[in-house]
């Protein structure tokens, strides 16, 4: 998670419980040049009660009556995880998954995941945070629906449990599917960075790619974005996900913007140095000047190229005597 923007292609539950579809999602993430592809690890009965209602966007995109019914169809088994991790290793992309319960935390730990991605919904779950924090992993945590005090409290729990603060990246996000553009509040990402002293990123739930690119320009170290094979597929998250070509376009733009950010030092670049003498100016003779004549504002001017005396030394030159004759446009020497 160092050096460049770490892009997580969020497959989530867009595999619809089909292992082959999950593999296809991994291949799409590879082709788009994502750094990691992320799934979700949960035991439905440990995640939601039978009374938990579906969110409005879930009611539109899935036919099950309750969250529990919907989630049961989207579980990945422990064996599925092994298959998908091996598939990712073969294709040189990092496998990530978000655990939603203690059993899932233990599974991912046993499988050797070095980075844990924590969802917004668990940011107020004290036992969950202590469990994850005690493992000493690198942690990326989303903060949708949260106040700054809640984010600070979650960080404190993770650190107290054993995770180093420098190993935590906090993602600003708005938990709405899709997120209205006017509710993104992207500058909150910088507020988190400044007030809490942590690395930050952005988990994007808007329908386009522009906000993720803007977050990169603001200094996000991690970008996360849902993607799918097709938005026409049934399931809770497909409608608010990018399709393959869009994912690739977003990641390409992020890479370009990341390069353009540079190191922040204001110095001439290598490519512009060769133009410096051509476009800067020198003090030159405005008209014919005889040797011994005083150099004045009336017989001097400033023109390209910049190979002579800099106009910044104008006041040092005015009032001197010409050391030789100067033709019009000739660079002044002293």
Image: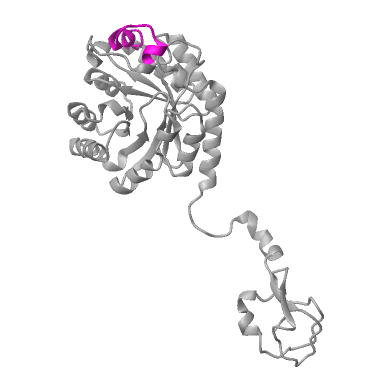
Residue 82 shows in the view:
no
Q: Can you name the residue that lies furthest to the front here? A: 182
Residue 211 shows in the view:
yes
User: Per the image, is 62 magenta?
Assistant: yes
| Quadrant location, the C terminus | bottom right
User: Per the image, is 176 magenta?
Assistant: no
User: Where residue 303 appears, x then y in whole percent?
Assistant: 73, 71
- Quarter of the image for residue 82 reads top left
User: Where residue 197 appears, x then y in whole percent?
Assistant: 30, 47
Residue at 43 percent of width and 13 percent of height: 15
Q: Looking at this view, is 177 or 91 the one in front?
A: 177
User: Where residue 13 appears, x then y in whole percent?
Assistant: 39, 16
Q: Looking at this view, is 86 or 298 the one in front?
A: 298
- Quarter of the image for residue 146 reads top left
Q: Which residues are magenta?
A: 58-77
| Quadrant location, the N terminus | top left
Residue at 40 percent of width and 34 percent of height: 183
Horizontal side, residue 116 vs residue 222: left or right: left
Q: Can you name the residue that lies furthest to the bottom here? A: 292
């Amino acid at each position: 998670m160092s050096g460049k923007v770490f892009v997580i292609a969020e497959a989530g539950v867009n595999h619809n419980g089909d292992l082959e579809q999950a593999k296809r999602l991994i291949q799409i993430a590879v082709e788009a040049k994502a750094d990691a592809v992320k799934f979700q690890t949960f035991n439905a009965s440990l995640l939601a009660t039978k009374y938990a209602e579906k969110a409005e966007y879930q009611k539109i995109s899935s036919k099950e009556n309750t969250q529990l019914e919907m989630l049961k169809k989207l579980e990945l088994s422990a064996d599925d995880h092994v298959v998908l991790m091996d598939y990712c290793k073969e294709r040189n992309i990092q496998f990530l998954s978000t655990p939603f319960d203690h059993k899932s935390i233990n599974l991912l730990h046993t499988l050797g995941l070095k980075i844990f991605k924590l969802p917004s919904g668990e940011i107020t779950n004290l036992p969950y945070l202590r469990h994850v924090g005690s493992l000493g992993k690198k942690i990326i945590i989303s903060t949708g629906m949260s106040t700054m005090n809640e984010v600070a409290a979650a960080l404190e729990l993770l650190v107290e449990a054993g995770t180093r603060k420098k190993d935590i990246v906090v993602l600003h996000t708005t938990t709405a599917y899709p997120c209205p553009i006017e509710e993104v509040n992207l500058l909150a990402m910088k507020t988190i960075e400044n007030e809490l002293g942590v690395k930050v990123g952005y988990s994007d739930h808007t329908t386009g790619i522009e906000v993720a690119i803007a977050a990169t320009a603001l200094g996000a170290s991690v970008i996360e974005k849902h993607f799918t094979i097709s938005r026409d597929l049934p399931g809770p998250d497909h409608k608010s996900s990018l399709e393959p070509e869009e994912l690739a376009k977003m990641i390409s733009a992020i890479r370009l913007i990341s390069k353009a950010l540079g190191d922040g030092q204001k110095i001439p670049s290598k490519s512009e140095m060769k133009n410096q003498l051509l476009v800067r100016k020198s003090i030159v003779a405005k008209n014919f000047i005889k040797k011994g004549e005083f150099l004045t504002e009336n017989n001097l001017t400033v023109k390209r190229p910049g190979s002579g005396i800099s106009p910044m030394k104008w006041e040092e030159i005015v009032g001197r005597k010409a050391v030789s004759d100067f033709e019009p446009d000739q660079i002044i020497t002293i």
